[in-house]
Amino acid sequence: MRSVSLVLSLALVMSGCSDTLSPLALAGRWSELFMAGGFNLNMTLVPIGKNLTGNGDFCVELGGCGTVKVTGAVSGDAVHVDISYQSLNALMDGFTQRFDGHLVSGNRLVGSVIGEVAGQRTQGPDSVTYQRS
């Protein structure tokens, strides 16, 4: 565990010294801040090379809960993540959010999301912040 913390700390320091963000700096659990309408999203990002993968969960006040599958990539200092929703009652099935942003501190991802269903935009772009949790 100590070596993982050391690697993550080193990745954060090195990412502040150049224009290239290490995907290791994004490893861990993230939660969306300032959500409206009783919406709650949590996701775990796992770096694999320059790519990101992961999973998570969400709840909508009147729409139930479900899981998310996460894929993405890091390019320079930019972070791109696709969040695919699967709900227990099919309300959110097929909904995908595309996040584009930057790591502004070791614990915050800031950017915008666009929501889509079957390639048709249904949301945004909306500003969003994810906090490491």
Image: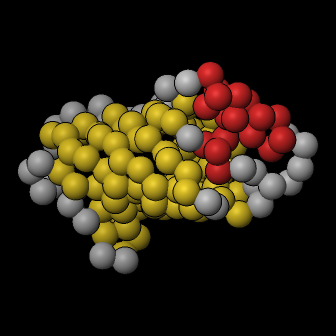
Q: Residue at x 36, y 75 (%)?
A: 120
- Quarter that holds the N terminus: top right
- In the drawing, does residue 67 fall left or right of residue 23? left
Q: Is residue 12 left or right of residue 79?
A: right
Q: Position of residue 20 (x, y in %)?
A: 81, 55
Left or right of residue 121, residue 89 in this image: left
Give the residue displayed 55% in from the left and 31% down from the top. 131
Please tell me in which quadrant of the rendered image residue 106 appears.
Answer: top right
Compare residues 64 and 106 and report the one nearer the observer. Answer: 106
User: Which residue is located at x 75 percent, y 40 percent?
Assistant: 11
Q: Residue at x 34, y 55 (%)?
A: 69
Q: Is residue 84 above or below residue 120?
A: above
Q: Position of residue 25 (x, y in %)?
A: 66, 41
Residues 6 and 130: in front is: 6
Q: Is residue 83 visible?
A: yes
Asked whether residue 125 appears in the rendered view, the answer is: no
